[in-house]
Image (tube, coloured by chain):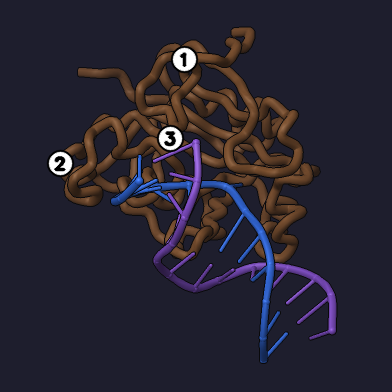
Chain colours: A brown, B blue, C purple
Amino acid sequence: MTRPARLLDAAFFSRDTREVARDLIGVTLRHGETSGVIVETEAYRGDAASHFVTRPRTGRIMGTTCGALYVYRIYGMHRCMNVTTETDHPGAVLIRALDPTTGLDIIRARRPGRPDRELCSGPARLFVALGLSDELNGRPFDESLTWSLPARRPEIATGPRIGIRHATELPWRFMAVDNPHVSHGGSRRLRAVAP
DNA sequence: TGGCCGATATGCT
DNA sequence: GCATATCGGCCAA
C-alpha cells in the first residue's frame, strides 16, 4: 500500500519558468498505461531562442496561457511537448527526457529496436514512447496526463540549452545528475544547482 | 507563393 | 563526428 501521490496543480506552473523547469525534475509523468520520471527539462521564457520569438504565431501560446500543453513539430517528422508557464510573462518548459518506469513493454513496442537507455532520452523520443499526439496542443496540462511529485527531489545540474543558436549563454537546461536517460551525455561536465 | 530553416533522431564514416 | 531525412511555420517578395 503506497500513499497517494501528490499531484501538480495549476499554481505549480504559474511560477517563474526556471523554477518550474527545475521542480519538474523528479516528477512522474503518466499517459495511459505508460509513465516515466522526468530527468531533463529546458526553460524558454521569451528569450531569443524561444518560440515566442522565433515562431510568433504558434509560440504565442507561451504568452497567452499558463498550464497548457504546447506541442510543436520540427524537422518534418518530430514532435516535442512543453507546458506553458507564468500568467504575466511568456514561458514554457520543454520536457526533454524521462526515465521510463511503467508500461515498459508498451514503450518498447512503440520504439522497436531501441536499447532501454534510448527509449525516452530526447524530447521527440519520449513523445513517441508515451504515445502522445498533436491533439494535445493547447489542452490543459492535467486533462490527459498525470503529474505526480516525488518523495524527494533528485540532485539537479544545469547547463546551456540544446540545439539552439541564440541565447546559448543562459543555463536554462535542468537535469538529474548521473541519470543515464538524460540526452546528449547527461550532466557529467555540468555544475550542480543549489538544492 | 517560393524558399529558408529548425528547442531532432538516426545511421554511417 | 557528420550527413540527411522531411515538412510546417514564417517571411520576403
Q: What's the amino acid at mark 1?
A: Val
Quadrant the N terminus of chain A occupies? top left
Q: Position of residue A19 (x, y in %)?
A: 65, 25
The chain identifier of the residue carrying mark 2 reads: A
Q: Are marks 2 and 3 in contact (CB under 8 Å)?
A: no
Q: What's the amino acid at mark 3?
A: Ala
Nearest the eye: A141 or A184: A184
Q: Which residue lies at the image location 33% right of the left edge and 33% below the top edge?
A: A36
Badge 2: few (under 14), some or many (20 or more) residues near its Cα, within 10 Å? few
Q: Which residue is mark 1?
A: A177
The chain identifier of the residue carrying mark 3 reads: A
Q: Residue furthest left?
A: A105
User: Disc 1 on helix, strand or loop?
Assistant: loop
Separation of marks 1 and 3 at Cα, in angstroms: 13 Å
Badge 1: few (under 14), some or many (20 or more) residues near its Cα, within 10 Å? many
Q: Which residue is mark 3?
A: A97
Badge 3: few (under 14), some or many (20 or more) residues near its Cα, within 10 Å? many
Q: Position of residue A129 (x, y in %)?
A: 31, 46
Separation of marks 2 and 1 at Cα, in angstroms: 26 Å
Q: What's the amino acid at mark 2?
A: Asp
Q: Position of residue A79 (x, y in %)?
A: 46, 56
Q: Foreground mark, 2 or 1?
A: 1
Q: Is residue A133 above or below residue A188?
A: below
Nearest the eye: A44 or A84: A44
User: Disc 2 on helix, strand or loop?
Assistant: helix
Nearest the eye: A86 or A161: A161
Side of C5 where A172 appears, left or right: right
Q: Which residue is mark 2?
A: A105
Q: Which residue lies at the image location 34% right of the left edge and 51% below the top edge?
A: A128
Side of A14 where C12 appears, left or right: right
Earlier residue among tags 2 and 3 = 3
